[in-house]
Amino acid sequence: MNYEAPPEAESTRLNDFSFTGSALEYFGIWIVNLLLSILTLGIYTAWAKVRRQRYFYGNTWLDGHNFEYHARPMQILIGRVIVIGYLVLINVLNEVNPILGLILTIPYLLALPWVFNKAISFNARMTSYRNVHFNFRGSYWRALGIFIGLPLLAFVPLGIVAGIAGIVASGDAGSAVFVAVLLPIAFLAAILFIPFVSRASTNYIGNNTSFGDAGFSIDVGLKPIYANLGASVLFCIASTIGITVIIGGLFVLITGAELNPEAVQNPLNNIGTFALFFLIGILAYSPFILAYLFYSAGMRNIAFNAAYLDGKHRLASRISRTRYLWIIVSNAAATILSVALLRPWAAVRTWRYLTFNTYFASQGSLDSFINVQEDKGNVIAAEYLDIDGIDFGL
Amino acid sequence: MIMDRVPEKLSGRFYFPDSSAVAEAELRYQNNGFRVTVLETGEMHFPELRELGDRIGNVPRKIYFTDGSVFECADNDAVDLAFGKSGHFASRLTKAEGSWRFVIVATVVTFACLFGIYRYGIPAAATFAANNTPSAIISAIDSGAQDTVDRVLLDESNLPQARKDELTVLFNEVAEASGHKDPPLQLVFRDGGRIGANALALPGGTIILTDQLEALAKHEDELAGVFAHEIGHVNERHSLRQIYRVLGLTFMISLIGGDSGQIVEDVAGQFVLLETFSYTREFETSADTYAVKVMSELDRNPMAFVDLLDRLLDKYGIDKDRETSWLDTHPVNKDRRENVRKQIERFSR
């Protein structure tokens, strides 16, 4: 990565992002938000979201100016009502007729790129700094290719092997070995394909985002992404070994004494045993969550460090992947063990870590950005992604 | 509001219309209009107010004007006084959020509310919603469930028609005694396949008896008790109540920690799963109680179906004498026997 300043270095200033919020102050906001949300049976959550965002954005500073969040609670509420109505409808349809639910996935996948674009657009439009708003202008077809096409492509080898496995399932031992060899190769192919997806989506979001009349530009290379992927895979393997040891210990401790072989053979007759397997299954899945967080933290650095604003100002991110992971995991533990009372502290801690490790190297004055009225995005799309837990970057 | 405390001017920063350009400035309200004076140049602007931003924490206040310019003032109290906003919702909220006394009270009240909702609110709301769900929706869910169960778990029944007719007569007798009407009840016979000896109740009134359970029964009363138990599930709408309770619990958890991330979400998911087991245990006990009532009215032996259950456990080699654990979907047989015994006493009195 090239950290040197571009040749026409007219007074480069390295500005730190900082955060002036505090866990104690945010606790007050959080508990009032929660109380009013309960008393209004959830309606206040829209107001709560706006207050939370305004608190975090408003206390985030760069070069003596803070950020602002502009979404209206009423907008958010309408978006949420529509999204929840849609989700209820889809779930009821699925319950009544699973085939129909399956057919509906196709229009859903086709609508998703539009939803992504409009959601990113809305969140960008609702953010401002120094009286100038961010914008995002996406293209449906490029989003379709990047967010739906590329990920599907990654699964083609896996799909083929699964298909073969289905055909030879009743076959001889030779074909079973054949599948057993092919399956890891196809899986590896899918993993090795991830950097292409990351690169395409990072460049797509970066190059279509602007700050007022000034565009961001970004061109991340594959090399650092593969390095990040390699580290993430190693991390995944290491944490799998660690968690396997923990689960093994727990399993023997809890059930070793009374594990009933007949009940295991017929799990539906002893759903308790069945549930225990399910629990362990979820724990076993956690190395992938951890590795995903590890990878995203690395991707944040790669993306920010390759980004320019208006061709001259530069962004930088220097978060440590392991430190970030530690913060996320210990935050989760604190949140659960305190029955959510430490949630405000955890939220402030994460945000503070991210802001204090983000930098902006400006070239000359920042006085001349002009606010541009653009496509406002769509609040329903933004709320859909929010409620579904889909998040772009950190 | 005390008039003489209203500040005559606000000091802060002025962002020029639709631009990131900024200057130290003062804002005054004179002759029914705003006047912004840029300190360095003395330049004056007379913008029209679009909106005053809501107060939050110690974040500097923004005053938005119609021409796209913004005045920013760090002194929130002065802004509130100048605009007469002290009594307004957002400003009151900010004061409440900043007062430790209020925050402590709010914390206690919030967690008391959450406990009450978790313990009483959600079950009551789920029962109410289940009782008010239109039959059309239930029967639609039912036909979907029947398809799935038939495809995945069950096969055609091998019982002779004469035996089926006999059991249908018995079923109708129990159904009539139960007084249950809507949704209409129907008994169907299936081979248990993977689930073996069992009986199921679908929410829409379809009750499935497997051949294996029929073979295990030694007395009519045993199967009559099973029918009464399953009718209890339908009558008290247990599957719907289960769905609504899980929905309510999930909603409550997302209110508390909705933005806490994947790890917290997964752990919360496990907690919800454990809760659903406690719900099903509660519903099983309730259906047993229902069965005792119906069987007592028919002068049949209400304890018979527990004997059948004991035989069922013996068949699958499951320990009858262990204690109920939090991973069980059904109470263990000795607890069920105990409950049935108590209910028999109650109904015979």
Image (cartoon, coloured by chain):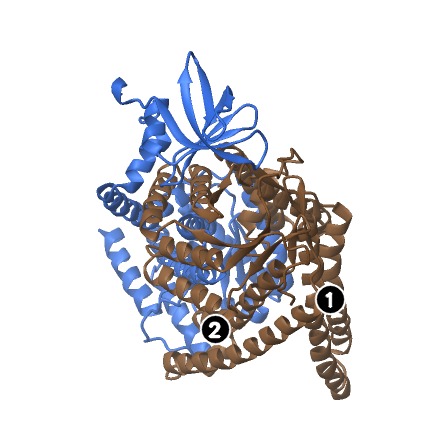
Q: Residues within 10 Å of mark 1 (few under 14, many from 20)?
A: many
Of the residues shown, which amino acid type is indicated by label 1?
A: Ala
Rendered view: B237 above or below A174: above
Which mark, residue A280? 2
User: Color used for chain A?
Assistant: brown
Residue hosting label 1: A154
- Can residue B291 be seen here? The reply is no
- Same chain under badges 2 and 1? The reply is yes
Give the percent coordinates (x, y) of residue B188: 57, 56
Residue pictured at 39% horizontal, 30% vertical: B11
- Examine the image and state in which quarter residue B156 appears: bottom right
Name the secondary structure under disc 1.
helix
Contact (CB < 8 A) between labels 2 and 1? no
| Residue found farthest to the bottom | A174
Rendered view: A85 above or below B119: above
- Can residue A232 be seen here? The reply is yes
Which of discs 2 and 1 lies nearer the camera? The answer is 1
